[in-house]
Image (tube, rainbow, N blue to C red):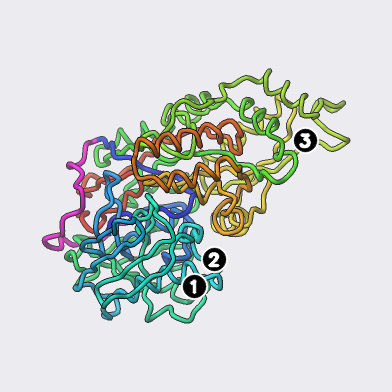
């Protein structure tokens, strides 16, 4: 049930994770060993957020993907060391031309309804994602490289690519969906999305809207039955209430949303605190809209935001300054880009140069139009709300009026972010194992067939993205992605703020938690209570 590759850049609402724990957990395994026996018990996880669609081929947000990890399996998986390992596949072969991938699949896997898993399910899943008649499936641009998918036999599937692609294996780390239950349906609206059937260690027993999602152990899971009997995802929208529930032992674990609460959790002898560092948390612009279609304006806003103060004062030091979408813990990270050190004087000069002058009101305007915009983010996260209000004050000091608005999570993602229906947004990206995820973030092709919801592209970046997947030599690829990061930093389509140190608290009675760079639930079948 290991991590599936996070296919969407978007939300990471709270968290993206790297293994660094206090107290230290057991040594992270390369792939989770099969549970030997069930130890029983019900684990209750508190979350401010409710999942959206429990379908791996349409789920748009990272929070939902955490639950999907426990319900579905992928052809391959990403383990806690960011390595690609077999999951539903037992092995694979790559042809010398780099264009044909043949996978041998396990023959002992069943869907939760007892039907056998076969190569037909793999082909169906990816055919559905690619299908233009299925408009809301995830990351279509990731699979534009696929020429065809062939079922060789029940346990063998072959992918033929249009050209070699160094990142292809990582694109197969998403959950496989059942053909016998979804064929002929619109994936985004299927009733299946509320009552899913997967192959994972847990199956859905109940989803009470706005209250909880109850998962129960699948008795005949191919790796062995999970140690827990039940895992309950309890929804508590108010993060302050959730904090009290965690401190009072009303839930067994959850995120420490506000770093200022960390001392309270460390004082509790019955709680263990886990720390992790993860994905870029940023403010992004709709780069097609005025005034954000002007590079000088974007750069000015970047210079006008004091990221170090956010990290030191609001985050209480629980974060490091972000530079790009690529995190420092991966081989493709480039630290040598413009960090936009806080310089309000420079920000003001750049806005002047862009024609946004200070008017009689003391705020900036151009051709009689005030520089005013709405900054959207999700509600329920007090830390994020505090940072949005801090940004409003900082940008007011350089003459820009900002109105933060806080929306319910699914509305924020589905109605605003995915539809590019915004002026500016505050959110986090997801941790990705291969830097080619930037193709669906910044490419021209992804403007119409991907996730370029920030509406920024660059012809030089398009060429570099193509180069990045055409070569397999990692040092050569790193040079390419270093240059991409340099260009993106210079163009400033977003304001990277911080890589968060994500904090979690679990009762000390919960054992074998091993955070990974992508998902703390990656080995939930190993947890005992």
Residue 252 pos. (x, y %): 30, 51
Inter-mark Cα distance, 1 to 2 = 8 Å
In this rendering, does residue 64 appear at all? yes
Question: Given this view, does label 1 or label 3 mark the residue nearer the observer?
Answer: 1
Q: Is residue 326 above or below residue 348?
A: below
SS type, badge 2: loop
Specify which label sits upstream in the sequence, 1 or 3.
1
> Furthest residue to the top?
345
Quadrant where the N terminus lies?
bottom left
Residue 410 pos. (x, y %): 55, 58
Residue 258 pos. (x, y %): 45, 37
Specify which label sits upstream in the sequence, 2 or 3.
2
Q: Main secondary structure of the magenta part?
A: loop
Task: Tell which of 515 and 10 is nearer to you.
Answer: 10
Q: Quadrant of residue 201?
A: bottom left
Specify which label sits upstream in the sequence, 1 or 2.
2
Q: Within 10 Å of the Cα at label 3, are there few (<14), some (14-19), or many (20+) other Cα atoms?
A: some
Identify the residue under disc 1. 187
Q: Range of the magenta residues? A: 23-44
For this view, does 436 lie left or right of residue 218? right
SS type, badge 3: loop
Inter-mark Cα distance, 2 to 3 = 34 Å
Inter-mark Cα distance, 1 to 3 = 41 Å
Q: Is residue 53 above or below residue 429?
A: below
Kindly indicate whether the residue at mark 3 contacts the one at mark 1 (C-beta within 8 angstroms): no
Residue 470 pos. (x, y %): 42, 48
Kindly indicate whether the residue at mark 2 contacts the one at mark 1 (C-beta within 8 angstroms): yes
SS type, badge 1: helix
Identify the residue under disc 2. 136
Q: Residue at x 54, y 25 (%)?
A: 338
């Amino acid at each position: 049930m290991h991590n599936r590759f996070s296919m969407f850049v978007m939300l990471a609402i709270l968290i993206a994770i790297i293994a660094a724990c206090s107290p230290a957990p057991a040594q992270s395994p390369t792939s989770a060993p099969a549970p030997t026996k069930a130890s029983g018990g019900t684990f209750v996880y508190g979350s401010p957020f409710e999942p959206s669609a429990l379908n791996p081929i349409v789920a748009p947000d990272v929070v939902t993907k955490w639950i999907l990890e426990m319900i579905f399996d992928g052809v391959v998986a990403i383990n806690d060391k960011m390595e690609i390992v077999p999951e539903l596949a037992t092995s694979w072969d790559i042809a010398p031309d780099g264009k044909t991938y043949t996978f041998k699949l396990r023959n002992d896997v069943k869907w939760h309804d007892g039907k056998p898993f076969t190569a037909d399910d793999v082909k169906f899943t990816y055919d559905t994602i690619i299908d233009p008649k299925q408009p809301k499936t995830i990351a279509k641009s990731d699979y534009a490289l696929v020429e065809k998918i062939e079922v060789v036999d029940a346990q063998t599937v072959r992918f033929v690519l249009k050209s070699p692609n160094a990142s292809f294996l990582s694109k197969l780390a998403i959950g496989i969906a059942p053909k016998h239950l979804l064929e002929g349906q619109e994936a985004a609206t299927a009733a299946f999305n509320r009552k899913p059937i997967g192959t994972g260690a847990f199956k859905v027993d109940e989803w009470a809207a706005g209250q909880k999602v109850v998962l129960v152990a699948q008795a005949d899971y191919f790796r062995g039955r999970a140690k827990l009997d039940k895992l309950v995802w309890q929804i508590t929208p108010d993060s302050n209430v959730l904090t009290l529930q965690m401190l009072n032992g009303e839930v067994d674990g959850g995120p420490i949303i506000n770093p200022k609460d960390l001392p309270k959790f460390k004082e509790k002898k019955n709680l263990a605190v886990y720390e992790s560092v993860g994905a870029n948390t940023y403010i992004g612009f709709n780069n097609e809209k005025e005034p954000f279609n002007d590079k000088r304006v974007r750069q000015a806003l970047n210079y006008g935001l004091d990221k170090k103060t956010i990290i030191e004062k609001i985050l209480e030091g629980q974060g490091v300054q972000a530079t790009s979408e690529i995190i420092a813990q991966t081989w493709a990270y480039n630290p040598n880009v413009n960090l936009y050190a806080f310089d309000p004087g420079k920000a003001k000069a750049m806005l002047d140069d862009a024609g946004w002058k200070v008017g009689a009101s003391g705020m900036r305007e151009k051709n009689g139009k005030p520089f005013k915009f709405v900054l959207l983010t999700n509600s329920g996260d007090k830390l994020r709300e505090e940072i949005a209000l801090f940004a409003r004050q900082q940008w007011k000091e350089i003459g820009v009026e900002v109105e933060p608005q806080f929306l319910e999570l699914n509305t924020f993602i589905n109605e605003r972010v995915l539809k590019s229906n915004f002026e500016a947004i505050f959110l986090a990206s997801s941790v990705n194992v291969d830097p080619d995820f930037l193709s669906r973030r910044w490419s021209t092709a992804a403007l119409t067939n991907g996730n370029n919801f920030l509406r920024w592209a660059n012809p030089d970046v398009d060429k570099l993205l193509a180069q990045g997947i055409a070569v397999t030599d990692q040092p050569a690829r790193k040079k390419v992605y270093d240059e991409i990061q340099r260009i993106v930093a210079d163009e400033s389509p977003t304001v990277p703020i911080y890589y968060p140190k994500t904090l979690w608290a679990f009762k000390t009675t919960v054992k074998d938690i091993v955070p990974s760079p992508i998902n703390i639930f990656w080995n939930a079948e190993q947890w005992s209570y």
